[in-house]
Amino acid sequence: MTTPKNTTTTNTTAGTTAGTTTKPILVLGSTGKTGSRVAAQLRQRGHRVRGASRKGPVAFDWTDENTWERTLEGVGAAYLVDSQLPDAAESMRAFGKLAVASGIERLVLLSARDWVVPEGEEKLPCERAVRESGAQWTILKPSWFFQNFSEDPFIRAQVQGGELVMSAGDGVEPFIDAEDIAEVAVAALTEEGHGGQAYELSGPRLLSLDSVADEIARATGRVITYRPLPPDEFAAHAVGQHVPEEFVGLLNLLYGWIAEGRFATLADGVQRVLGREPRDFNDYVRTAAASGVWAGGGDGVSDGGGGVERP
């Protein structure tokens, strides 16, 4: 791996030698888009991984504190994913305190890119909970994942059907490869120089949904178009495609931010941490198309999509 360009000085984490922890590294959401890749990359580098999720072999549930202590036992660092639940900040704060009491020294949180909130409202309270945990912390703030187009069942089914239907208007987004997010997370979990850092992460280009459809169409040799809908019409369409109602509002919110151009800027976090440019959407599309993921039909049931994923 390229030596990280970030040179922030931090205390050496106990239980680490030359950037390699002697304790297992906990990966929450280990079956998700980023968590699965974080776990895989850690194992490739020789680290011991404890993968935990609602459906994995090590059970973890943000709503069941009885699952927390066993998950944390003997762990030296942890990759965390915001639960997106109404009490997420309170759970994150309690988990962070328990993690530090259990001996964890590093916490890496997958959050989301910054946005403006009304005066008086706290911005991203889960981030604050991690910052105040007492552990060495790093926060990752990515844009939308490339992999939403191939791994989110609802959006993948749209690609398979030849039409992307979203309420994102003609906005643009600096989509990012989840592999890049995972590589940055691994660096933060295992290397020095990332403590106390919040990294904004994006891909190398701003892409409209029309451009996304065009690039997938070229790679697959099929006709794929983008049809923007007003939020109310999209909600009706999504419910008709069996998207759980609790996610329809979230999708409309995320698509609305794209329509507004709220994150229509490139970030340099990948370059700062990895010393290279982010992977390009076209490279991802060619690989995904060659895998056949867009060839067959899907069940169309979404896991929510978006930059922040659930464990």
Image: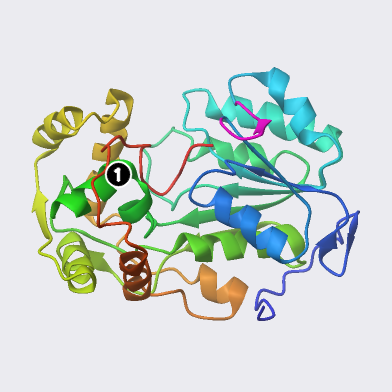
- Residue underneath mark 1: 254
The one of 258 and 69 positioned closer to us in this rendering = 69
Q: Main secondary structure of the magenta part?
A: loop
Left/right of residue 209 with respect to residue 196 in the rendered view = left
Left/right of residue 96 with respect to residue 156 in the rendered view = right
Residue positioned 15% across, 50% down in the render: 161
Q: Is residue 257 visible?
A: no
Relative to 71, residue 291 above or below: below
The image quadrant of residue 20 is bottom right
Figure disc tally: 1
Please name the amino acid that badge 1 sits on. Answer: Leu
The one of 219 and 258 positioned closer to us in this rendering = 219
Viewport quadrant of the C terminus: top right
Q: Identify the image's colour scheme: rainbow, by chain, secondary structure or one colour.
A: rainbow
Residue positioned 52% across, 52% down in the render: 34
Q: Secondary structure at mark 1?
A: helix
Residue positioned 43% across, 51% down in the render: 114
Left/right of residue 39 with respect to residue 86 in the rendered view = right
Judge whether residue 57 is colored magenta: yes
Judge whether residue 156 is colored magenta: no
Q: Which residues are magenta?
A: 55-61
Q: Can you give x and y, in whole percent of width and height, for residue 5 in the image?
A: 65, 78
Q: Is residue 18 visible?
A: yes
Q: Can you give x and y, in whole percent of width and height, for residue 297 in the image?
A: 23, 46
